Image (cartoon, rainbow, N blue to C red):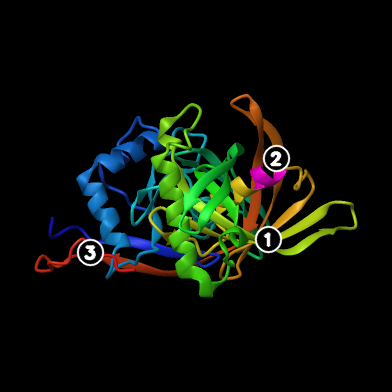
Amino acid sequence: MTSMTPIETIDWHTGGEPFRIVPDCRMAVAGGGLTVAERRVLAMESDEVQWVRALLCSEPRGHADMYGGFLVPPDDSGAHLGVLFWHKDGFSTACGHGTIALGAWAVESGRVQAPADGVTDVVIDVPSGRVTASVRTVGGAVEDVTFTNIASYVLDGGVEVATSRGTVTVDIAFGGAMYAVLPAQTVGLRVRPEDITQLIEIGREIRNALNAAGAAEHPTDARLSGIYGTILTEEVHPPERRADGSRRLHQRNITVFADGEVDRSPCGSGTSARVALLAGRGELRPGDELRHESIVGSVFRAWIAEQVTAHGNPAVIPAMTGTAYQVGTSRFTVDPRDSLVPGFVLR
């Protein structure tokens, strides 16, 4: 494929993490009668869709850490829209930062009507389920967005992984995608920009080892199996007691997902997995707040919205508040003489 109809996108960022919205998706995944989860499978099998994904992710139109989504019809009339999340290596099952950006875009663009002052729920079908972006407006402008996720839970704890830095112990949790979580200090690192190359290396190493061992099988849906990312954490401050008796935790993380991509935001689905783990340990209780900071200093405020069960085991519905901003619009084209399509990735 060497020529195409131009692709219009709206680019946003949530806590520094890019989210490229493709609102007019005319490819095969836009057909009727399918769930978003089914459309994701079709997208992964479609040469045309994969080509467009690669075009938008790869250089010179994107970069190794690019992220975005194709808008598709929702599963039914109970949601405002559906979305297929993508990155340079394929299509993910969940994306909290993208959900926050989509909620803000839906209100700012007028796709979902909202009052000048108030909170408007934008309901979005994603491959892992139905989620909500509660958009708060003040004076007609979006102030922030609260992302409420699907049930999140601990899948396994104390899993040993042999690495180049010695054997480490990780916990595995589901927050719309599967994550392996461990303190950064156990591999001799800090969650800071100067350690980024080594954090990526160990994150990839842990993910690949766990996936080779089949360590993260979803209880009911094989499409959600497999470690999507590795989360390395550190405590910024000890928990503090608030006036009402609740506690505020302040932690920092880096999420290394797919094949070595780094989330610049605190990672929405990763924060959900983290909330589930902290809740399972009794370190985060209803009424408590997790101040979850990214490697670039952006913050999600997260908490337990509800205690539930999933697959017969304790689980939580996590919620978190963050901000998203539009950074531009693009009209991508391809010159039929260009031999470097759909593009390339250098890291």
Report whether 116 appears left or right of 209. right
Q: Is residue 77 above or below residue 65?
A: above
- Please state, as top left, top right, bottom left or bottom right, where the C terminus lies in the image: bottom left
- Please state, as top left, top right, bottom left or bottom right, where the N terminus lies in the image: bottom left
Residue nearest the viewer, comparing 7 with 182: 182
- Residue 192 painted magenta: no
Judged by its main secondary structure, the magenta piece is: helix
Q: Name the residue that disc number 3 marks.
A: 343
Q: Which residues are magenta?
A: 275-279
The image's mark for residue 280 is: 2
Label 1: state its secondary structure: strand
Q: Are marks 2 and 1 in contact (CB under 8 Å)?
A: no
Label 3: state its secondary structure: loop
Residue 6 position, x and y percent, is 23, 61
Quarter of the image for residue 286 reads top right
Under mark 2, the amino acid is Gly
Earlier residue among tags 1 and 3: 1
Earlier residue among tags 2 and 1: 1
Q: Residue at x 86, y 58 (%)?
A: 242
Q: Is residue 10 above or below residue 288?
A: below
Q: Residues within 10 Å of mark 3 (few under 14, many from 20)?
A: some
Q: Residue at x 65, y 61 (%)?
A: 234
The image's mark for residue 251 is: 1
Residue 64 position, x and y percent, is 35, 64
Q: Nearer the viewer, mark 2 or mark 3?
A: 2
Quarter of the image for residue 294 reads bottom right
CA gap, disc 2 to disc 3?
Answer: 44 Å
Earlier residue among tags 2 and 3: 2
